[in-house]
Every structure is written in structure tokens, then in C-alpha cells.
Image: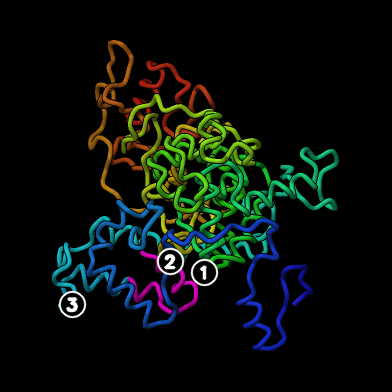
Amino acid sequence: MPPQHGPFEIPTSLGELEACLLHPLDMVLSNPPKACDDAQAGHPFLGGERSGHERIRHLVKSGAVSTYKETRNGLLGVDYSTKLSAWLALGCISARQVHEELLKFEDGKADAYREAAGYGKGENAGTAGIRFELLWRDYMRLCTAKFGRKLFKLSGFMQDKSYDTKWKTADKAVAARGQDPSPDKVSRLLERFLEGTTGMGLIDASQRELFLTGYTSNRARQNAASFLSKHLDIDWRYGAEWYEMLLVDYDTSSNWANWQYVAGVGNDPRGDARIFNPVKQAFDYDKDGTYVRAWVPELRGLEKPENVFQVWTTSHADLKTCGLVDSIMATDPLKRIDFRLDRKPRTTRRSFPRKRGGGGRGGNNGGGNGSRRGGNGGSPGRGHPDKSPEGSADDTMPKNSDFGGHNQNGNGAVVPPQQPRGAAGPRAKYHNGPYGYNVVNGSYNNGWYPDYGMRGRGAQYGYNGGGGRCPCTGRSRSTLVCRMCTPVRTHEWVGKLSGV
């Protein structure tokens, strides 16, 4: 093994190895986070095979496997996600063993689970979600096997020799000439990101939790990775290496492939266009600021969640009351996002036309070891929309909807698994325009658009394939419709596709 730069060392004996593992991390950061005595760690488990199997049985008996789909984006607590990632990463349990235990519960073949809700009633949304994350975990290993050393390249899996994105770096030897900010300033930005003093509440809480416990949730990992790579434009590998050093559930393939994905250089069809808005995400998943206050105790005196999520928005009087007037999080945040609460409550329906295809990363389908979106995540599967400072219309993890069921895309990338789901669109050919289309006034009703439920669904939904391209954009007919088209032209184009 080649020599390693500090603080990394290669032990030469078991005693040295033990000393390195137990050595505190204070030397790494000049201002490390202080322990929060009253903050509950999300991963307070012991290692080993026996402990791993006890955890699986607990998840089934408590009903956590059945509610996994609804709870997996939690930030605080022990059972919001499976937390099996560490045992899987270390080989204490296997994905097949998890699957087998779920089968016993679903098929009603284990008396120990008889009292659990859903016993003997087959696969439910929760157990399907856990399996889906296990598939993602395997997919990350497939990517490593296919792309090899590209797992660690700045340009990632998907970029060719023409890739010329200039990432900001603290390394003067490789920094672009005239890099702004300078390498020295980037070094300071990185240090604040790692310390959890960015001024972005959700990011700071996640970074402190990670440093103090070796764990942070999948949702938090996605946001942290997106913040570093998309908001700060800093070399994403700094974050991947930091996670490698700290995560109790670290897994090489899951960690590095997911950081690539979030950074826009991995197997994400939307690439750079996918950005998380950490303020919106905080309101969606920590609406009262409970998680942020737990790990950033100096913010507990702030009453308004918007101030907790961005300290700089706090009035001077409130800053003074809480002793935060001189806090660097208030005076010099790394990012200022103008986010207002004058919006409709979050719903499960999308506010814009987009394929509702198979499951994808994060959102409601994420998980742990191999967090698609930064690090390994909080459950078996993992370890981050148009680019703007404020994020985009879709602030959840990718749905991988553009893969269309093929095994490879045009760049030769292995296509991720798709989660089975029921049909979302009409069931027959269109004869008088698609359902929900008003031919008279040229509009779509009920929030339905031509690409809703049709894309990639085959001839049984009126798509007869064939050549041809969109008359507006020249895009392949497989995309069915372009939102730049006028309603009438869109209707005519869908009509052609459906054989009308």
C-alpha cells in the first residue's frame, strides 16, 4: 500500500491498529463539534452476527418493516429506517438473510412474527421497499465491477475525455489558474463544512451527528453531499473521503458511487440538473427544527424554524438574546438561500409533468448502506432539479425515470433497478385525445399530461413505437412529448404515437 498523507496512517501491528481506531479525531479539525449529551444517537447498536439477526427480528416484530416506506426519510430515532447497513457492510448479515426473514413474515411461516401487523399477508409496501434498497446495494457493486477505478475519479463513471468541469479544490497543485475562491479559502470552506458551522441548519446538524456518532440518516447524507458538490462546487471527493473515515456503515461501492450520483458525475440521467434545497428539505422533513436543535444546541433558543434552518435570517434582537450576534453561522454563512413559506402544503402529487416511473433513489425509496445520494444511508440500500441557488421544483432524490427499462444507456452505463409499481396511466388507446385533454380549449385537466403514465409502458398503452422525433426539439419519439410544444401540437404528436 502506498504511503498515506496525514492524518491517515498504516498500522504495522495489532496494537497500533487498535490505537489508531481509538484515537480521537480532535486533531483533524481545529474546532471539532462538542458532544451533545441529550442528543440521541440514531445508531446505538453493537456489532456482530447475533446482534444483526436480533435487529432483523426486532424490525419484523415491531412492525417497522411494514411502515418502512413511510418512515425511511426520518432524521431522529432508531426505527425510522432499518439501520441494517453497518451489519451488511461488515458482513455480519447478508442481503439473502434479510430477504429470507421477510419471506417468513410475509408467508406466515414463523410463529415468532404472528403478532406483527401484516403477518401472512404477503409483500407490502414496506417490505418491498427494503428489498428494493438491497437491490440498489447490489447495483452499486455492479457499477464498481464494471467501471473499476472510475469509482474514485473526479469525472466519475459517465464522463469521457471531453469532461472539463472545474471543481474548486484546496490543492494548489491541481487548482485551476485564478480559481475563485482561492485554494486557501476553499480549505477554510471545507473545514467549516466538516465542523458543521456552515450556517445551514440541516447540513450543520448532519455533519455534527456524523462526527460525534459515526452515523447520519440517508436524507441528511443526500443534502450534505448536494450542498458540498452543487451549492459550493467543491470537489465531491473531499466529502466521500470524509464519510469513508467516519461512517460506521461505510461501504466502498455504496459510498463512492452515491457521492458520484449526487455530484452529477455518476449514473444519474439528470446529472448537474439535480440540486437539493437544504432549506426546503428541512421544512419538509424537520418542520419544527427538532433534529437541527438536537445536534446544534446553540440554536435551541431560536423560536422560528426558518431561523433555525438559516441563522442569518434571525433578527438582531433574537440573535442578541440567544448569544449568536457574533456567531459565524449568522455573520458569514457559506450560503444564503431566499426561501419563503408562502407555498402549498407538501403533497404526494407532483406539481409539474414528469414521468412517474420506477422507484429511484431517495425520495420515498431510499435507505441505508449505499445511500444513493451521499454515503451509505440509513437502511440496507444506500449511504441529492434545474440548477439554481434555491434548488428546484423536485427536491427529492432521483427517480431514474429516463432509463426506460433498458439494460444500458447510450454511454454504456449499467442501468439501475426499477421498482415495480401499478399502472398510473390510461389502459386503452386514445381515440379522442388522451384522458384529461380538453380538445376545445387545448388544455390538460386534472393535472394529467401526455407523458404521465405512458413513457416506456409499451404498445398496450397506445404507444406503437417506430422512428420519428419530436417536431419541436428533435428528441427521440421514445420521450413521447415535449412540454415546449403547443397543446394542439402536443395532442397531435401523442395521437401519432398512439396510432390514432
Category of crowding for the residue at label 1, using alpha-carbon neighbours closer than 10 angstroms: few (below 14), some (14–19), many (at least 20): many
Category of crowding for the residue at label 3, using alpha-carbon neighbours closer than 10 angstroms: few (below 14), some (14–19), many (at least 20): few
The three-letter amino acid code for the residue at tag 2 is His
Q: Relative to 453, is 267 above or below?
A: below
Viewer-proximal residue among 1 and 57: 57
As measured in the structure, the alpha-carbon distance from the residue carrying label 2 to the one carrying label 3 is 25 Å
Residue in view at x 39 percent, y 29 percent: 352
According to the picture, the residue beneath numbered tag 2 turns out to be 43
Instruction: Indicate left or right for 116 with 163 as reference.
Output: left
The quadrant in which the N terminus is found is bottom right
Q: What element carries label 2?
A: loop
Percent coordinates x, y for residue 338 in the rendering: 53, 28
In this view, the mark in front (1 or 2): 2
Instruction: Indicate left or right for 397 with 155 as reference.
Output: left
Instruction: Indicate left or right for 187 with 212 as reference.
Output: right
Q: What element carries label 1?
A: loop
Image mark for residue 248: 1
According to the picture, the residue beneath numbered tag 3 turns out to be 112
Residue in view at x 63 percent, y 55 percent: 239
| Colour convention | rainbow
Along the polypeptide, which appears first: circle 2 or circle 3? Answer: 2
In this view, the mark in front (2 or 3): 2
The answer to whether mark 1 and mark 2 are in CB contact below 8 A is: yes
Q: What element carries label 3?
A: helix
Q: Does the magenta stretch include residue 85?
A: yes
Residue in view at x 79 percent, y 47 percent: 183
Q: Relative to 283, is 217 above or below?
A: below
Percent coordinates x, y for residue 432 in the rendering: 25, 21
Q: What is the magenta range? A: 82-98
Percent coordinates x, y for residue 190 in the rendering: 68, 50
Along the polypeptide, which appears first: circle 3 or circle 1? Answer: 3
